[in-house]
Image (cartoon, helix red, strand yellow):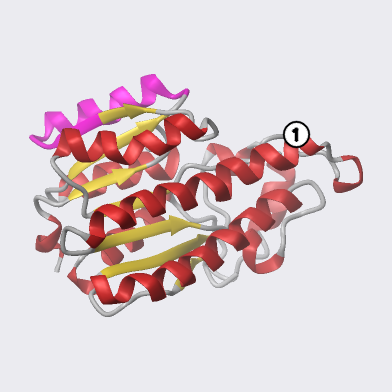
Amino acid sequence: MFEAIRGKRALITGAGSGMGACMAELFADHGAIVGIHYNKSEAGARKVQGMIQEKGGEAILLRADLMDPGACSHLVPRFTQEAGGIEVLVNNAGGVQGHPHFLEMDRESWDRTISLDLTAPFFLARSAFGYMMDHGGGRIISISSIAAKYGGSAETIHYGAAKAGVEAVTKTLARAGARYGILVNAVQPGVIGTDFHRKIGRASLEERVKQIPLGRAGTPLDVARLCLFLASEGGDFITGQVYGVTGGD
């Protein structure tokens, strides 16, 4: 099933650590030419690139601050130029830009979170969509969050709102892309054992994990495997969907 990934050019944002790094390695293990986007995590990105190259794979490093409109708009064209094209975009980069209680939330925290988690994924997807229209189609996969399902907490309401927007954009692009062979889906991780979730505090994380029916936090590989499936021939008849990787949550 995954043989179709071999030789495909896949740009993965936020691939210097966590889920993105795991995706980059997994896609490369199956023969994809991987674009490792990062912003601040250069050391991590170079480590991922090194591991891929040690196994005979090909990986391209691309730095860009996705909250900078200019840098964001140039990321997909840079990758297509260096890799010779793009068949897969995984919108993985994201995060919470400040997390005060919503009653005290400043406009900057709201705007920066929306910019990183909704605005940037849309414009990256639009850029990849334009290329794919003229080159036989492709796959666009955006990472949402269980926060879009339940709503964010009082401190992450902006993050939940952005991820809900990502899911709406996914469905619109899927309808528009079907005639061109552009399949667009979203993956909705639950609690995943990465630094992102550990930042909320050990005690609260442990309590949150107890609510998961499968009794554990997810792993980056759990999410990466679904992304690989959606990018493969296994996803040939799947578009406009949002898939939870939540352990039953």
Q: Quadrant of the C terminus?
A: bottom right
- Could you tell me if residue 235 is visible in this image? no
Q: Residue 47: image x %, image y %?
A: 29, 25
10 shown above or below 98: below
What secondary structure is the stretch in magenta mostly built from? helix
Asked if one can make out residue 164 in the rendered structure from this viewpoint, the answer is yes
Q: Which residue is mark 1?
A: 108
* Horizontal relation, residue 242 to residue 77: left or right: right
Around disc 1, counting alpha carbons within 10 Å, would you say few (fewer than 14), some (14 to 19), or many (20 or more)?
Answer: few
Find the residue positioned furthest to the top.
Answer: 43
Q: Is residue 8 left or right of residue 48?
A: left
Residue 158, x across and y down, in percent: 72, 50
Find residue 152 and report its image quarter. bottom right
Magenta stretch, residue numbers: 40-60
Residue 6 drawn at (x, y percent) = 10, 53
Inspect the image, locate mark 1, and give the three-letter code of the amino acid beneath it: Glu
